[in-house]
Amino acid sequence: MNSRRYLMTAEDVVGLLDGLDAHRVDACVGGGWGVDALLGSQTREHADLDLWVPADQLEQVFVAFAAQDVDRILPWPGDRPWNFVLHDGIRRRVDLHLYEPLPTGVIHYGSAVDGVSFPAEALNGRGAVAGRPVSCEAPEWAVRWHVGYPPRDVDRHDVPLLCERFGIELPADFR
């Protein structure tokens, strides 16, 4: 793995999201920045920006990010055609999660053989990064996506904050 230190600042997030907006990309902030967006303030450092994007908008994503020099693919363990990392070669890193919105109101993420589906409401959260309103994961889903694997230090930081703020029961792995 790359030992380079990546750091995604709030200003970076706002700039990247503004660029995506200019190219009509419907981006939804996930991961750690999604948690901080829901909380309304930055609570820790972030190595990357996780984004959910409709797969049919990938070309606009590439154009928007190329304009900001975030145009290199960073090979990462577990990469898939629907989930991979773009970076700028210095410190900004974006973890893209491409999905297919289905006519039934469900979102499909992953391959046709072993993908997962979840309700579109999972990506209907609202928050703010550095005062900028953003679309983000809904609180219940932000918590749900932090379980099912051994919690990391960042998970142990993020999940209790979300649960406390939104009245969600703390998952067993975090008690």
Image (cartoon, rainbow, N blue to C red):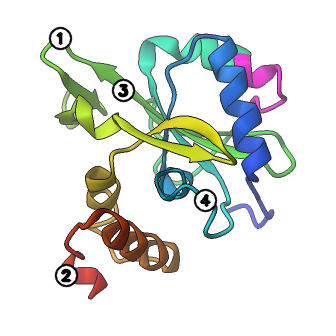
Q: Give the range drawn in magenta.
A: 64-72
Q: Which of 1 and 68 lies nearest the eye of the viewer? A: 68
Q: Could you tell me which secondary element the residue under label 1 belongs to?
A: loop
Position above or below: 138 against 52: below
Q: Which of 106 and 17 lies nearest the eye of the viewer? A: 17
Disc sitting over residue 172 in the figure = 2
Q: Which residue is disc 1 drawn over?
A: 103
Q: What residue type is labelled 4?
A: Ser
Q: Which residue is drawn at 42% across and 72% down?
A: 161
Q: What residue type is labelled 1?
A: Pro
Q: How far apart are marks 1 and 4 (CA)?
A: 34 Å
Q: Distance between the residues labelled 2 and 4?
A: 26 Å
Q: Could you tell me which secondary element the residue under label 3 belongs to?
A: strand
Disc sitting over residue 25 in the figure = none
Q: How far apart are marks 4 and 3 (CA)?
A: 27 Å
Q: Which residue is disc 4 drawn over?
A: 41
Position above or below: 140 against 161: above
Query: Is the C terminus in the top left, top right, bottom left or bottom right quadrant?
Result: bottom left
Q: Which of 170 and 63 lies nearest the eye of the viewer? A: 170
Position above or below: 156 against 39: below
Q: Is residue 74 visible?
A: yes
Tag 2–tag 4 contact (CB < 8 Å):
no
Q: Which residue is drawn at 49% across and 50% down?
A: 34
Q: Point out the tag, 4 or 3, that comes first from the N-terminus.
A: 4
Q: Distance between the residues labelled 3 and 1?
A: 13 Å
Count of numbered circles on the image: 4
Q: How far apart are marks 2 and 3 (CA)?
A: 29 Å
